Image: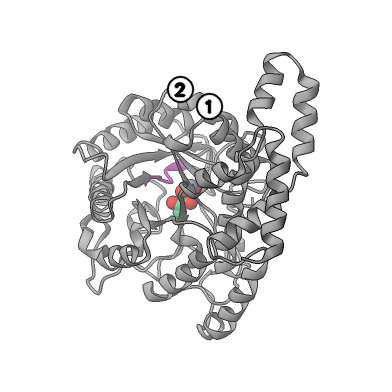
Amino acid sequence: MDQTIRSNYEAAKALYAKHGVDVDAALEKLSQIKISMHCWQGDDVRGFLNKDQALTGGISVTGNYPGAAGTPEELRSDLELAFSLIPGKHKLNLHAIYVDTDEKVELDKIEPKHFQKWVDWAKEQGLGLDFNPTCFSHEKSKDGFTLSHPDPEIRQFWIDHCKASRKIGAYFGEQLGQTCVTNVWIPDGFKDTPADRLAPRKRLKEALDQVFEEELNPAHNLDAVESKLFGLGSEAYVVGSHEFYMGYGIQNNKLICLDAGHFHPTEVISNKLSAISLFTDGILLHVSRPMRWDSDHVVTMDDELIDIGRELVRGDLLGKTHIGLDFFDASINRVAAWVIGTRNTIKALMRALLDPVEALRQAELEGDYTTRLALTEEFKSYPFGAVWDYYCSKNGVPVREEWLAEVKAYEQAVLLKRGEAAAAPVEAETNV
Ligand code: RNT
Ligand code: ZN
C-alpha cells in the first residue's frame, strides 16, 4: 500500500481514538455491509423481455448518453467493471424483465431457469442477488393498474407474476447461500381524484394475500412491499400508499421498503427508520435522490444520505436493514453513475461508523446540547477521507477519483461502440 495513504490513515486513527472511536473496528463492520446495486441503471430500466415496450408505470429516465447495455452480456460486463471499482462484496438487484433466455416467456410464466445465467454469473463473481417482479412497461399494465386492477383476469396475471417472482427469489437465495429480498412495487393509481379510494386498496390487499400465500423459507427469500406517494400519471392517488404498506407489512410480517423519493419533498426516510424498526423484523431501503419530485438522481453525499447512515448505525439497525439503491440517470456514463452512487452510500455508512456516538449520546443524556452540536459540527471536518482512501486501497479498488480513468477507458473501448442510446425522449410525459 502507498505509504502516504497508510500514514494519513494512522494519523486519522489517532484523532478518532481521542473520542473513543475505534477506526479498525469501524472498517471491519463496514466490510460486512452489503449494498444491493440495482441492475436497471445500466440500461435505463428497459430489460430484455419486451425490449420495444416503452418505460411506463409513472417512472421516467431522461438523457441519451451513449452506451446503454442492450444485452445481458453487455450489462454483466458493465456491472463487472462497476463492482471492481467499489470496495467490498455486494449484491445485484434484478428485475423480472432482465430474463436471460432465448425462450419467449411471459411474465406470469417466468421460472428460475430463465435466470440461470445470472445465478451462474453471481456465483462466479461472489455476489448475492435480490429480485423484483416487474409490474410496469407491459401491455397488461397500460391503463395504470396491476394487482389492484378491477378486471379479475388482469389482476390474476399480475398475481401469478408476483408468485413466480417469489419462487425465483427463493431459488436465488438457495443457490447463492444468501437471502434474496423480493420487492413488490406496483404503479397503480389515478391521475385525478378518485371516486372510490377504498375499493382498489381492498383489491390490492386481497391480491397480496394471494401472492404471499405460499410460505417460503425465510433463509432463501424475504418479501418486501414498496409504497409511493405519487407517480407520473398517478398524481392524485396511489393505491399502495405508505400507510397501506405500513399496515400490510406489519400485519403480515413483510419488509417495508422505504424509497427516499417516495414521500413529500421535505419528508425524509432517515427519520422513519427508528420508528418502523420497533414494529418490524426488517426494513428494505431504496436509497435514491429525489430532486423536486421522484426523479431518481444518482445518490450524492448529501445530508439525507449521511442521516440514513447515522440512523442505521446509531439505532443498531444494520443487521435488520437491507440496503438497496434505486436511481437511473441516462444523462451521464451509466457505469460511473453506479460507482458514484454506490461508493457514496458505503462512504456515508463509514462516516456514520466514525461518529463519536457514545460521546454524543452522553452529552444528550446530560442535557449538554452545546457539546452535542459542537462535536457534531467539528466531526464534519475530521479526516474521514484518509480512512476512506485506506479502505479502498486495502480492498484493492482505486483510491479517490482514480476509478474515473478506468470508466473513461471502458467508455472509449466498449460503450461508444454500442451505437444508439436506449432512453427514448420523454419530454411530453414529464411536464410536471
Ligand atoms: C418506482 C419504484 C421502484 C422502481 C424500480 C425500477 O417509483 O421506486 O422501486 O424504481 O422497481
Ligand atoms: Zn424504489
**Number of marks present in the image shown:** 2
- Residue that mark 2 sits on: 278
Looking at the image, do the residues carrying marks 1 and 2 touch, with CB atoms under 8 Å apart?
A: yes
Residue 249 is situated, as x and y percent measured from the top left of the image, at: 37, 30
Residue 34 is situated, as x and y percent measured from the top left of the image, at: 45, 49
The residue segment tinted magenta is 184-189
SS at mark 1 in the image: helix
Farthest-out residue, top: 366
Give the residue drawn at x 73%, y 48%: 383
Label 1 to label 2: alpha-carbon separation? 7 Å
Q: Is residue 130 above or below residue 262?
A: below
- Packing grade of label 1 (10 A; few <14, some 14-19, many >=20) is some
Is 360 a magenta residue? no
Q: Is residue 247 above or below residue 2?
A: above
Residue 260 shows in the view: no
Q: Nearer the viewer, residue 300 or 429?
A: 300
Quadrant the N terminus occupies:
bottom right
Give the residue drawn at x 40%, y 45%: 186
